[in-house]
Amino acid sequence: MELRPVVPRNPIPPLVLVVTVLGLVIAVTYFRTTEAQRFVATHRVLVQRSVIRLAMTVGYDAGPLLEEDYAMSDEDGVSSSSYRGLGRRGTRITITERPRATLEDGVNVAYFFGQVVQDGIWELPSRPPRGDTRTHYRLSIYQLTDTQHGSHVFEFTDPHYWATTGGHQFHITLSKDKPVPDLLQLSSTVVVEPRYEKLVADFRSFGPASFRSKVAAAQARLSRT
């Protein structure tokens, strides 16, 4: 009796088998790549840096105060703020709020940042000395988000002057028929900009009640020394 090997009735063609295995390899590879990319993207969001720094320096040419510095920062959601006052006789007072997610009375630097941005801190330019030039203001802003960052600094005097009186902005029109303009007949517009005064008020009123009361006490002490 002759024995013959048993052959399956529906054998899988070699080409189908190769295609199936190749498809499984591609699917597993795609899944692993997608999950790896998703993990990297999620991790980047979790660890990306977020930094906000705001400051106002006020310099005085006369009086008992020589300089005041207001500084606020927010790093990855943690707010901190400080005030430094320097008297003309050398007395220095520094008040610092400890870093925390939300300061007393629900105040935080991120909210303050939105307020001063709305009031034009990115947009206002420096102005020449006008009005009461004995007091000088210098405002600065810095922001870092992931790999993007930007900063802006500008200076001015007498914010109330700019808010109420303003300065003149002259307009010169050049023409090929008349290349040299008549400087005695220039047109001008008055530039009144209340946002300078608004920003100064923002910085002076920042912080919880306890912080503002300490600043007021420091200013009173510096005025007496």
Image: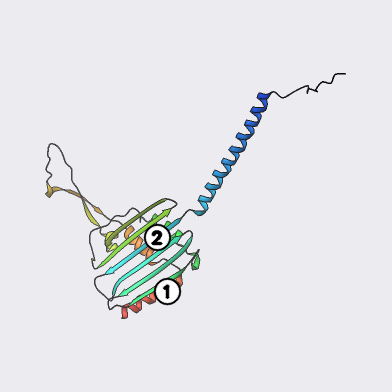
Q: Position of residue 89 (x, y in %)?
A: 28, 78
Image quarter (top left, top right, bottom left or bottom right) of the N terminus: top right
Element type at mark 1: helix
**Pointer 1 local density, CA inside 10 Å: few below 14, some 14–19, many at least 20:** few
Element type at mark 2: strand
Pick the residue in front: 190 or 86: 86
Residue shown at 35% from the left, 77% from the top = 220
Q: Does residue 218 appear to the left or right of 19 in the view shown?
A: left
> Three-letter amino acid code at disc 2?
Arg
Residue shown at 30% from the left, 67% from the top = 58
> Three-letter amino acid code at disc 1?
Ser
> Can you tell which mark lies on residue 213?
1
Dividing the picture into quadrants, the one containing residue 112 is: bottom left
Pick the residue in front: 186 or 61: 61
Outermost residue toward the top in this view: 1
Outermost residue toward the bottom in this view: 225
Q: How many marks?
A: 2
**Pointer 2 local density, CA inside 10 Å: few below 14, some 14–19, many at least 20:** many
Outermost residue toward the right in this view: 1
Pick the residue in front: 171 or 127: 127
Relative height, residue 83 to residue 191 (above, below)? below
Q: Earlier in the sequence, mark 2 or mark 1?
A: 2
Image quarter (top left, top right, bottom left or bottom right) of the C terminus: bottom left
Q: Position of residue 67 (x, y in %)?
A: 30, 71
Q: Position of residue 184 (x, y in %)?
A: 12, 49
Pick the residue in front: 4 or 16: 4
Distance of mark 2 from mark 1, alpha carbons?
Answer: 23 Å
> Can you tell which mark lies on residue 53?
2
Q: Nearer the viewer, mark 2 or mark 1?
A: 2
